[in-house]
Image: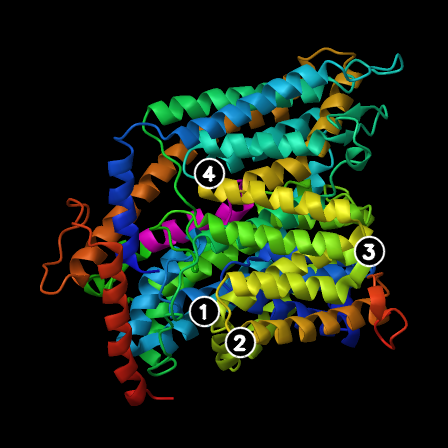
Amino acid sequence: MGDLSALMAGFETALQPEYLLFAVVGVLLGTAVGVLPGIGPAMTLALLLPLTYSLEPTAAFIMFAGIYYGGMYGGSTTSILLNTPGESASIITALEGNKMAKAGRGAAALATAALGSFVAGTIATVALSLVAPTIADLAVQLGPPDFVALAVLAFLTVAAMLGSSPARGISSLALGLFISVIGTDSLTGQQRFTLGLPTLGDGIDIVIVAVGFFAVGEALHVASRLRRGPIPLVPISGRWFTKQDFKRSWKPWLRGTAIGFPIGTIPAGGAELGTFLSYATERKLSKHQEEFSHGAIEGVAGPEAANNASAAGVLVPLLTLGLPTGATAAIMLAAFQSYGIAPGPQLFSDEPDLVWALIASLYIGNVLLLVLNLPLVGVWVKVLRLPRPYLYAGILTFAALGVYAVGASVEDLVLLFILGGIGWAMRSFGFPVAPAIVGLILGPIAEEQLRRTLAISQGDPTALVTSPFAAVVYCLVVVAFIGSQWLKRRQARLDAAVFAVAQASTTPGGPTSPVGEGRPTVPSGKERRDAARTKNDETNDWDSGGQW
Amino acid sequence: MSTVDASGEATARAARSRGPIPKSELAVAAVLGGLGVFALVDAHTINVPASASAVGPRAFPYAVGALLVLSAVGLVVALVRGDRGEVEGGEDVDTDGGADWASVLKLTGAFAALCVLVEPLGWLIAASVMFTGAAWTLGARPWWRALLVAVVLNTLVQVLFTQLLGVYLPAGPLEGVPFLG
């Protein structure tokens, strides 16, 4: 059990007061940005990438791990308490969690989400510590053509799974690859796509692209379509967590973990799919069918566990193969690169101290989240109430600051804003941003491996497919592509069915229509908002009778 | 997440995909294809040194250009088959109405002010102007409260970055003031 002693050594490192402090800061920061709408873990890590210039790697990665887990955690608070549509990964939690909150059971929803995240996060981190070294051992034998195949697999699955259609995902991927080529070719020193501009000679810094696409793009997007009026928060009410709640929650937690972790490890576009599958499972298995779409605790417990388990799963291909399967993982990969560390099979043998300290800090982060989060829920609610004009002005300020701090260059700021404009356009026209980020960061690695393969084979392209592993991966690409389209259709069907039921049940006096039966009529936007507001007023009455 | 909104969106989406293809969506595909053609043409002008091995600096750019052109074609095919871009949702995003160009223009102005002012006037003043402008654009009233928040925030940033993190931020006319320059 060499791994166990390595893990213990990791704990020894991560538990040093200084590193513990970085873990606490990361967890708090991560939860705060997870709670704030418009900022995700990917954007936060992008903004903090410049820190890698002044922090030592262990401290930086312990903090990044805290932000990563904290962000997942904070998102559930938002979707339970905020009465507006959110990002897709948290839709499922919102579906039942928001209903629970409105029905005066917000406290129980928050509790099952927090406890479920802890249980799932811890089990999945154990799985990560067991699986990752084994995969790394096997992966050591992989050669350049195998990594080309893995990169192709990641590109296509990320492009196909994220976003509404493969055409849009692949367009986004191609844009990211294009930006990655701009600059000086590292092997031959030739300028590519620089238009002769000296600014572009060294390529565009990943920080500028990531911050532009995520932070500035999001700020412009929200500015162009800001939801005006008061922030529709549902007050927290009800008992925290009863025996009955626990009885109904623990199985969904475990099932969610079992679904989420494997889905996180394969390039399937991140956490979203796992939460949908977990929700579908709980819906089928629950003894409280009638409560679904009205606030069933199983529908919060399962997906929330799946969400956190897949967050740990995502780290398996990242740490063992250097393969990012989503935007957040891609930015973590960029952070490794800025330290001159290449995640991949050699990581566990070359940088054992760093990797195991990182994994140990995931365990610690989970405990910290459990200890800090429920008691601090009042703080998170205040964070949620942050007036939006200040929030987005602040995002713009920190985006500019992050980029300016790197090079003190006004040209970089202009470039940042142009890239932000592209990010805005992508959001307006329904192009997912994540494939572009994956293409941007994984593109140069793929090119290097491709050229290495062909240099070894002296230009013979069949070398790309004659390695047995690569051949298997290309077969998987085909299967994964077909499978992902099937899963997405299934997800869309479930989506539509669930929304149809929810719609029917919110119509006053309307019968609950069976799943999948016809789409209900749509009230106008104004009516809908009014309806939401009335509902909020009703829930305010619950608050006074609340148990806390 | 208000479920009512989402089912409404689904219906609206179904209704939209029956209509004609919006010109703006075709324009996006055209831009993408144009970028691809540029990549293919420009890749041809990349120098290939004699020392380059079997695959030189041109191969990958060619592949990227081809992928861009292919994805533009794929996008047009998808549009013809009824696929329509959906505005990305979010907690603070109202997907019902159209884009508010005036706000975006004001925000662009605020950011441009930062770019122009940061070197002569320093980070604190330039970023405070930008923050105030951006917050005011997004509805912060009265403007002096936004300015107050901006000055406090950016003073903290200036002190933290230059004094504690050792990162250079220009101080402008405040050069020499303790803790700022």
Q: Residues within 10 Å of mark 3 (few under 14, many from 20)?
A: few
Residue A442 is situated, as x and y percent measured from the top left of the image, at 67, 36
| Separation of marks 4 and 2 at Cα, in angstroms | 32 Å
Q: Looking at the image, which residue is at 60% across and 60% down?
A: A395
Dot 4 or dot 2: first in sequence order is 4
Q: Looking at the image, which residue is at 76% across and 57% down?
A: B118
The residue labelled by disc 4 is A161
Q: For the residue marked with disc 4, what is the amino acid?
A: Met
The residue labelled by disc 2 is A373
Q: For the residue marked with disc 1, what is the amino acid?
A: Thr
| Separation of marks 3 and 2 at Cα, in angstroms | 30 Å
Give the residues drawn in magenta, as a range: A262-280
Dot 3 or dot 2: first in sequence order is 3
Task: Check if residue A275 falls in the magenta segment.
Answer: yes
Q: Are marks 1 and 2 in contact (CB under 8 Å)?
A: yes
Of the two numbered discs 1 and 2 in the rendering, the one whose residue sits closer to the viewer: 1
| Separation of marks 3 and 1 at Cα, in angstroms | 33 Å
